[in-house]
Image: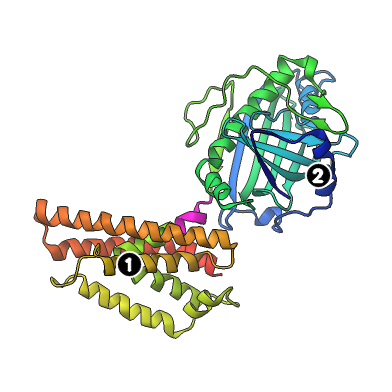
Amino acid sequence: MIEWRWLSGWTEEELVPRLDEARSLGRNYAAGAGEMTLEAGWSQVHSVGLLGHELPGPPQPDGIFERARKVMETFDFSDPRIVRWHFSADEPLRGRTVLLELKSLGQKLRYLCAVRVGGTRLEHGEKCSIYGFSFETLDGHIEAGREWFLLKKDHQTGEVRFHIEAAWHPGEFPNWWSRVGFALVGRRYQRAWHRLTHVRLRELTRRRPDLVGQSAESGRIEHSGHELELGPVQFFAQIAPGRKKTQMDEEVEAVHRGQWLTPLGLGVLAGMRSMSAPTLVSRRLAQASGPHKDRLTEALSKPWVPKVLGLLAAGELVADKLPKTPSRVKLVPLTGRVLAGVLAATASVAGQKRSVVALAGVLGGVAAVASSWAFYSLRKVATKRFKVPSVAAAFTEDALVAALASRLMPGVEARAE
């Protein structure tokens, strides 16, 4: 289930049947908690913020911990300028289905996806108290994964902290441009949402107790998102160093970046040495066990194919040093490099949706063109301006090809398996 709209959201009359439909959806991933690792392709995010202090010991009846717990139960900690939640409070928290209205481009572009509350925790031990729940993404969500929201009180110090722990990878998209947009700006929106989540929860529990436990709007279903004066939404290209403690104490991110870097790298490799990219992919496919996913990978995995491609790659290394070899940026050689980049990039994502395969092929072809011109220009500068011998420049590029191929091997190997 996923929908998108431009300039407007969904009315309550439209949301009610969609929420009913979402209750029948299953998770859009099968991995267990122990399998959602960075090595298996899952990005990891962990952030911690200090909400405040109350008296040592178990949570006070009207203390920060209990007020924050009531805010969490209404999902009001989510900034409605980025994500607004629609749900039924009549459903028990555990197993509750929630519609997420994701907003971007100044709230002009909106997506509607579904999640479900998976696990819940309420523990009062000798040293600390913990309350929280997890969200699990359902079929049609633009992400796949699980996210935990946890309150923790240290009984000795009285500190109350809020933790967010997530494991995710890209999910399903309604169109190709949404996938491209997510790849370009998705992480910035996620970081902004994490930062504002800590700020909103602190604001609601410490400074706006009048809103604690109240939904922003109520009708046939509940809607999160009280409007608060928190300043503009700020986006960061990466985790911003030196953030004030009034926002977040700790933020750790480990993002699996192989989704598009492998096709891109294979395109660059093809621009440097045209046969190197398909040879690398073919060898990995031939070594992989199990059935292959389409005709292309089936053909490249035949035992004799990597041997033939390897011979052609070795011949190209020799030909590259010959003075009469035509320039790589001429029409015929450049076309061959583009085709090699498209072939390798497409094979590296075989078995995924057609839009993903097509986009990977385009990425590989464009990268091959850019790489061909870039290394042609570098060779020209090295040999003419800096008087580097042509053979020495060629061997230096060979070394770069080998280094890049070794970096790409794990990504190609993971997809082959």
259 in magenta: yes
> Splitting the image into 4 quarters, where does residue 205 fall?
top right
- In the displayed structure, does residue 352 sit left or right of residue 217? left
Judged from the image, the secondary structure of the residue bearing numbered disc 2 is helix
Q: On the image, numbered disc 1 is attached to which residue? A: 335
> Splitting the image into 4 quarters, where does residue 264 fall?
bottom left
Q: Position of residue 355 (x, y in %)?
A: 56, 59
Tell me the amino acid under the disc marked 2: Arg
Residue located at (75% from left, 26% from top): 155
Name which of mark 2 and mark 1 comes first in the sequence.
2
Q: Position of residue 214 (x, y in %)?
A: 82, 23
- In the displayed structure, does residue 112 sit left or right of residue 309? right
Q: Position of residue 180 (x, y in %)?
A: 52, 48
Q: How many marks on residues?
A: 2
Residue located at (26% from left, 74% from top): 316
Tell me the amino acid under the disc marked 1: Thr
Q: On the image, numbered disc 2 is attached to which residue? A: 18
User: What kind of secondary structure does the magenta stretch mostly adopt?
Assistant: helix
- Near mark 2 (Cα within 10 A), the count class, few <14, some 14-19 or many ≥20, is some
Q: Looking at the image, which is closer to me, 9 or 404? A: 9
* Magenta residues, start to end: 256-262
Vertical order, 334 against 306 (above or below): above
Vertical order, 310 against 364 (above or below): below
